[in-house]
Image (spheres, rainbow, N blue to C red):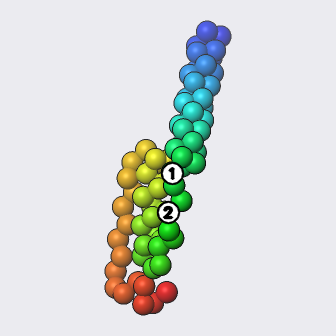
Amino acid sequence: RAGADAGDLLARAVDELDSTIQEVRTAIFALQQPPAEAPATFRGRVLRETGGAAAVLGFPPSVRFTGAVDALV
């Protein structure tokens, strides 16, 4: 039983280290990118942020706009 508990603890520690390494890599990658001009529209800002979140999330998020978002914000 103690061996199983130690194994579970070790597996959790490895998972946490993997997550931390991914966050560090994402931060380093972001720091290496040249500064981009800020989008002028709300739609552009949302798309930029969701696109950047893909590296952290591990999958590309999707966004759907309905109507004239830029005219309403």
What residue lies at 45% left-to-right and 90% top-to-bottom? 72
Residue 36, which numbered label? Answer: 2
Amino acid at circle 2 = Ala
Q: Residue at x 63, y 21 (%)?
A: 9
Q: Residue at x 47, y 56 (%)?
A: 52
In the image, residue 64 sits, relative to residue 61, either above or below, namely below
Q: Is residue 70 above or below residue 32?
A: below
**Element carrying mark 2:** loop
55 vs 36: above or below: above
Q: Quadrant of the N terminus?
A: top right
Q: Label 2 crowding class (10 Å Cα cut-off): few <14, some 14-19, many 20+?
A: few
In front: 36, or 44? Answer: 36
On the image, the x and y values in percent for residue 25 come to: 54, 38
Q: Which residue position is annotated with label 1?
A: 33
Q: Position of residue 70 (x, y in %)?
A: 42, 85
> At label 1, which amino acid type do we have?
Gln
